[in-house]
Image (cartoon, helix red, strand yellow):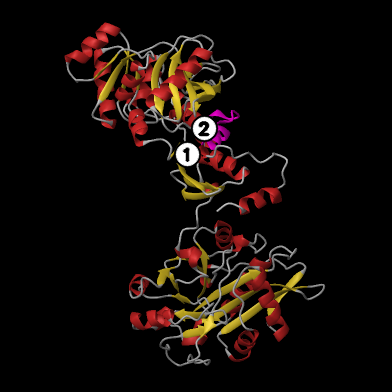
Amino acid sequence: MTDVDPRQDPAAETTEAITLALHDASPPHMVDAMADDVVLELGWGRLIFGQTFADPERLAEVLRQEGQGRRDICIYAREPHVLVSKAPAELFIDPSHTYRLRFADSQETAPALRGFSVRTLESRVDADEMNRVYVRCAMVPAPNDVIWDNHCHQDAIDYLVAVRDDDGAVLGTVTGIDHKVLFSDPENGSSLWTLAVDPAATVPGVGAALTRSLAALYRERGRAYMDLSVAHDNTAAIALYEKLGFARVPVMAVKRKNAINEPLFTHPPETVDDLNPYARIIADEAIRRGIWVEVLDAEAGEMRLSHGGRSVITRESLSEYTSAVAMSRCDDKRLTRRIVSDAGIIVPRGRLATFDEADHEFLAEVGDVVVKPTRGEQGKGITVGVDGPDELDAALARAREQHPEVLIEQRAEGDDLRLVVIDGKVVAAALRRPAEVTGTGRHTVRELIDAQSRRRAAATGGESRIPMDAVTETTVKEAGWSFDDVLPEGTRLRVRRTANLHQGGTIHDVTATVHPELRSVAVAAADAIGVPVTGIDLLVPDVTRPEYAFIEANERPGLANHEPQPTAKAFVDFLFPGQPGIPQNWTPEEVDRTKSDSP
C-alpha cells in the first residue's frame, strides 16, 4: 500500500509510497487461528490490521499511541467511520483508494526486464540502500536494524529490491505483507507497501516490475489476492495499477492526525496561483514591487497587501478605500442614476417598474426599453431591446427573479463603453460587444454557441460563458434562426443583446481614441458617486465623439480585462502612493530581497 504522493518526485514510477511497522507485542510466528489485535512494526510506523480488533475503542487507543515522527496506518477496519468517531480530533479516514489484484482473474505474462533485475533483500547494505531510496522519494525511512530483523525473523514480511545489472545499484524497493502467514487470514490475502523508485533511476519500468514480482511471489504461495493503497487524486499511479489488472475495492485506511499527515486532512494554504485572473493581475503587480501578498480567500479574490507598515485588504479591485456608502450607491442602479443626473450627467429616461399598465404606457411612449433589476451584477436579469407588451412582461418577470425592484429605461443607441477610473483618472477605455458566433456551414447554432462559450471560459479562467437561456434563444430567433439551424459559413450571428463580459461578451481597447469629453464624464460620475475605483459604463454612438448616455457604475471593475493598459499599476499606485515599482530588469534574487523587508 502507498502513503507518500510520488508527484513530489516525477521519477517515482507514478507510485505512492507507504510504510509499515511491527508492534513489540505481536508474535513474529505463524499462529493456528486468526490472531487478535495484530500490529506490525515496519520501522517508519506500524501497520495495524483493523479486522483483527474486536473492540473499536481498543483500536482507536492503539492508533493514538503513535510515536513521534512516525506514520501508523490502520487498514481493513470493519467500521472506519465508527473508529474515527472514537477520537475525531485525532483520527481521520485516509483519502486513498484501495486496489486489489485477484490472482484468479489475472495471469499476466510479465515482460522481460532490461537493464535490471528484481531480487529479495540480501544484506544490511541493501537495507541502507532502501532507506536511501525512501529519503529521495520524500518518504519516512526505517531503522536499518528493523528492516534487517524483519527480513531475518518475520516470515510474513517480504522485501524486494530492483538492482541495475551493470553495477548492482539499488533502483527501487517494495515491501509485501503475507496476511496468511501473519494472522492466518481467512481471506488468504496479501498486500503491497512502500513501493518506491529512485528518482535518479534512468531505467524505465522499475515500479511495474517490482509490483509484478511481488504479485508473482504471492500467487506462487497460493494467496487469493494482493491489495495496495493509492491517493484518490494520483491519476498516474492509478492508471499504472489498473493497467496491471488491479481493481478498486471498498476498503478504507485510518490514520492519526500528525504533522506528516497534515496535507491529507487539511486544505493546503491558498497562494496567488489559486486566484482568479482579476485578483491575480493585482497580486503580480504587488509582488513585482516587493509588496507582501497574503491570500485570504482565493475564490473571492480577497488578499491582504502589506508594505512599510501599511496594510490594505482588497477583493479584486475593491479595497477598504471604497466606502460602504459608495458601494451602496453603485449597487442601487436607481440611486446611481439620480446621483449622476444631479451632477449634470446625461442619463436615459427611466422609471421604477410598478408592474401595471403604467409600465406599458412608458414603453408605448419611448418605443424601446431596457429592463434591469435595480440591484445585481454580471448582467443577470437584464433584457435589452424590449419593444412589445408581452416581451415587457416577460422581461419584468426575469428581472424580478434577481431583485424585487426593477428599473425600466429608454434604450439609448450606441456601443457599450467601459471606462476604468482610478483615483480621479481614466486609465483604460474599452468597447464591449455582445457575444456572437460565426457560421461554419457544418455546425448548428447551438453547437457554435457551446464552442464559443468554452473558448471564452478558457480565456477568462471560467469567468465568461454564454448562457443557454431564454434570452439567448429569443435573440437568435429575432435574427431569423433557431438553435438547431446550421449557420452558413462566414455568417456572423449575435446571440446576446447585452455586452456583459460574464455572459460571453468581448472587449476591445479604445483607450487611445476615446473622446476627452467621455473621459471627463467618467471622472465626474466617479466623483459624484464618491467611489475611488470604478468602471463607468456609457452608451456611445462613436468613441471619438462626445455624445453619450450614462448606464451604470461598477465598484469592482475587472482590471484584467483591460490589459495591456496599466490598470493594475494604477490600482497599486492608489493603494500605496509613493511606492515605486521594481525595475523590470531586476533579478529574482533582487526582488526577493525587497520582499524580505515586508511584514
Q: Position of residue 108 (x, y in %)?
A: 61, 67
Q: Is residue 208 above or below residue 399?
A: below
Q: Is residue 110 above or below residue 598?
A: below
Query: Which of 549/120 is in front?
Result: 549
The answer to which quarter of the image holds residue 243 is bottom right
Whether residue 222 is visible, yes or no, is no
The residue singled out by tag 1 in the image is: 316
Whether residue 475 is visible, yes or no, is yes
> What is the secondary structure assignment of the residue under circle 1?
loop
User: In percent of the image, x 52 and y 78: which residue is there?
Assistant: 190
User: In percent of the image, x 48 and y 31: which residue is there?
Assistant: 453
Q: Position of residue 141 (x, y in %)?
A: 62, 77
The residue singled out by tag 2 in the image is: 559
Disc 2 versus disc 1: distance between alpha carbons? 8 Å
Magenta residues, start to end: 559-574
- Which badge, 2 or 1, comes first in the chain's sequence? 1
Q: Residue furthest right?
A: 166
Q: Is residue 168 above or below residue 594?
A: below
- 561 drawn magenta: yes
Q: Position of residue 171 (x, y in %)?
A: 72, 71
Residue neighbourhood size for the residue with mark 2, other residues' Cα within 10 Å, grouped as few (<14), some (14–19), many (≥20): many
> What is the secondary structure assignment of the residue under circle 2?
helix
Q: Residue furthest left?
A: 356
- 242 drawn magenta: no
Secondary structure mostly taken by the magenta-highlighted segment of the chain: helix
